[in-house]
Amino acid sequence: MPEISGIHHVSVTVTDIERSVLWYCEVLGLTKLMEEPHPDGTGYAVVLGKPDWSMCVGLHVHPTNAKERFSETRTGLDHVGFMVSGHADLEAWESRLTELRVEHSPINDKEGYSVLVFRDPDNVQREFISMG
């Protein structure tokens, strides 16, 4: 059976693409890699990520979007977790989120992993997670 080697990108529909691009670049330190119209001619996507394209976040805008805030209680995306290399990185992210006034949980140490939870401008839950 072929194997999956990792997740390359996650894409979300946003209510205000300019606000979201700024937020993801400032908070997560991502770089704008490309902008592309949707194949059907409605809306477009901005892809942000690491310069080597090893991890990306796609932000999509659709003209039919009702602009409601995200809720994980509806069918679809629940949340996205970003792996970090260790607890020290979680602490650094906690400091950065605090500095940028991004509301977040405290670091929650569980058996086998630790997690730091926050939300993007459209209320989509994001997590930084460290295993071990």
Image (cartoon, rainbow, N blue to C red):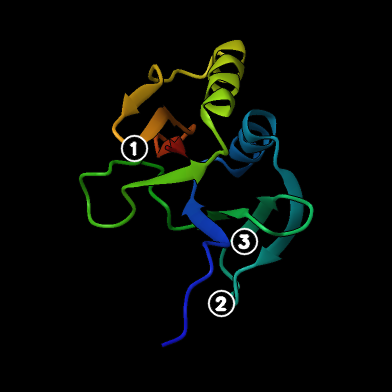
Q: Are marks 2 and 1 in contact (CB under 8 Å)?
A: no
Note whether 122 is above or below 104 in the view shown: below
* Residue 128 on image: x %, y %: 48, 35
Quarter placement of the C terminus: top left
On residue 112, the disc is 1
At 58% from the left and 14% from the top, the residue drawn is: 95
- For marks 3 and 2, give the CA distance: 10 Å
* Front residue (pair 12, 30): 30
* Residue 103 on image: x %, y %: 45, 18
Circle 2 sits in a helix, a strand or a loop, which is it?
Answer: loop
| Marks 3 and 1, the one that precedes in the sequence | 3
**Left or right, 55 with reference to 51:** left
* Residue 117 on image: x %, y %: 40, 29
Circle 1 sits in a helix, a strand or a loop, which is it?
Answer: loop
- Give the residue type that dot 3 points to: Tyr
Q: Which residue is mark 2?
A: 40
On residue 44, the disc is 3
At 43% from the left and 31% from the top, the residue drawn is: 119
Which image quadrant is residue 44 in? Answer: bottom right
Note whether 15 is above or below 123 in the view shown: below
- Badge 3 crowding class, 10 Å Cα cut-off, few under 14, some 14 to 19, many 20 or more, is some
Circle 3 sits in a helix, a strand or a loop, which is it?
Answer: strand
Note whether 17 is above or below 75 in the view shown: above
- Give the residue type that dot 1 points to: Gly
Point out the frontmost of discs 2 and 1: 1
Quarter placement of the N terminus: bottom left
**Left or right, 73 with reference to 12:** left
| Marks 2 and 1, the one that precedes in the sequence | 2
- Give the residue type that dot 2 points to: Asp
